[in-house]
Amino acid sequence: MARILFGLCVVLVAGSLASAADVVVKDGDKTGKAKIGDTVDIQISNPALAKMKEKFKAETKPDKILGTAKLSDEVHKSPDGKPMSGGGYKSIKMKAEAKGKTKVKVSWEQDGKAESREIEITVE
């Protein structure tokens, strides 16, 4: 009986690891790869500037490769679960919906200057 339970636990853990296929693209990366159904999370460092939030936007081509972008403010956490000092970032999450290559343009204004990043996402 213990062997059966152990076997079931191994299958469940292996299955959950295989389905955890979300893709994180860090600030500074120029490309990312995903599979259909994955959630792509583009993370742009967010210094403690409230003005950066005013004109922050993400644009994708109307090619239906990625779904609608959902923007949020997030904070990286240390291993003990506490928020890291200066660890704030903007998160842009999109669902990979079709195969192909597309570009995501992320833009904002900081200290009165326009800033932007362009990331190419390949969905296989």
Image (tube, rainbow, N blue to C red):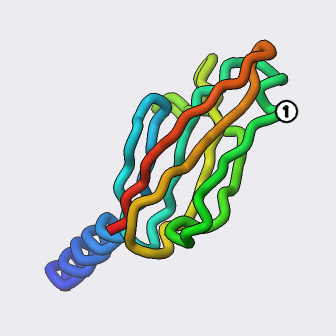
Viewer-proximal residue, 32 or 10? 32
Please tell me which residue lies in front, 10 or 100: 100
* Relative to 39, residue 19 above or below: below
User: Where residue 117 sits: x, y (%)?
Assistant: 55, 34
Q: In the rendering, at what x and y percent does residue 61 appear?
A: 58, 60
Q: Is residue 4 above or below residue 72?
A: below
Is residue 89 shown left or right of residue 79? right
Q: Position of residue 26 (x, y in %)?
A: 46, 36
Can residue 20 be seen here? The reply is no
Q: Quadrant of the N terminus?
A: bottom left
Q: Where, by quadrant of the figure, is residue 11 drawn?
A: bottom left
Tell me what residue is drawn at x 78 percent, y 13 percent.
111
Q: Where is mark 1, residue-wise?
A: 54
Q: Which quadrant of the figure has residue 69?
A: bottom right
Q: For the view shown, which residue lies furthest in the left direction?
A: 3
Left of 51 or right of it: where is 8? Answer: left
Say few, some or many: other residues with alpha carbon within 10 Å of mark 1 (under 14 / 14 to 19 / 20 or more). few
Whole-percent x, y for residue 65 in the image: 50, 69
Q: Height in image: 112 above or below 121? A: above
